Amino acid sequence: MTTFAELRDLTIEQTRKPELVGITNAAIVTAVKRAHHFDFFPDDIQSVSLTYAPTASAIQQLSNAKSLMPNFRAQKALFCQDPVTFQQLEQLGWRELDDFYDLDGRLKPSIYTYVGSTLRFVPMQPTGSLASYYYANPVTTEVGFASWIADTYPEQVAMLAATGVWSRTGFREMANDADEKNNKPFRQLLINSHILGEVN
């Protein structure tokens, strides 16, 4: 497990600017998030059970749903589930807020959307329980730092951070050079190695 401090040491080895602690720390946070945002990686998927109080309305909602999913980035899948057995009963499909009704004005079934942090959804049968699968951002705080990309590719993430330091301190040519020679190939490596297709 790569720690934040280890990543900082690796970044300083590249920049040779140990006095720029604040800029280096900020660049590490940005670099780690940037690496995870190169694409939607299966290793970033987390799951959590969400509970809500069913109402008589066809449209159910759960306020502050995103805050119940640590480091929420984007929804992957959402299922209604049995609150006792946790068996998935129905998959909900994402729709835009203005796409909840069909051309005849009927509410579409088995759909969901977000209004800010509030989850709005139309289950066939409100069970009071949801299974949420979502893409999570890495933990970029010094305490509790967690990134599978930094664990697997610490030198490449440090170079990504070093590029940020150079860019913020006026060394644009060095930043551009590192971006072309190191960061773009790293991005391609992550996508080629960690975006899974169907395996037969």
Image (tube, helix red, strand yellow):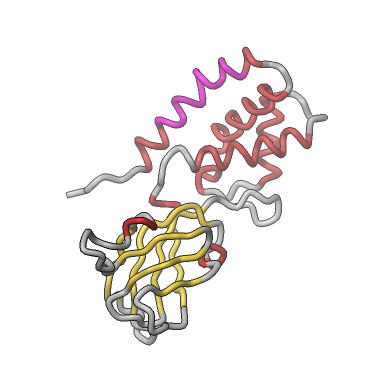
* Number of marks in the rendered image: 0
Residue 168 placement (x, y as % from top left): 70, 25
At 66% from the left and 25% from the top, the residue drawn is: 14
28 drawn magenta: no
At 36% from the left and 82% from the top, the residue drawn is: 127
- Of the pair 58 and 172, the residue shown nearer to us: 58
In the rendered view, tell whether residue 71 sits above or below residue 25.
below
Residue 51 placement (x, y as % from top left): 46, 78
In the rendered view, tell whether residue 70 sits above or below residue 52.
above
178 drawn magenta: yes
- Which residue appears farthest toward the right when viewing the image? 19
Question: Quadrant location of residue 90?
Answer: bottom left
Question: Quadrant location of residue 133?
Answer: bottom left
At 32% from the left and 74% from the top, the residue drawn is: 123
From the viewer's perspective, tell me whether residue 36 is left or right of residue 79. Answer: right
- Of the pair 69 and 25, the residue shown nearer to us: 69
- Of the pair 7 and 178, the residue shown nearer to us: 178
**Magenta-highlighted residues:** 175-188
From the viewer's perspective, tell me whether residue 167 is left or right of residue 87. Answer: right
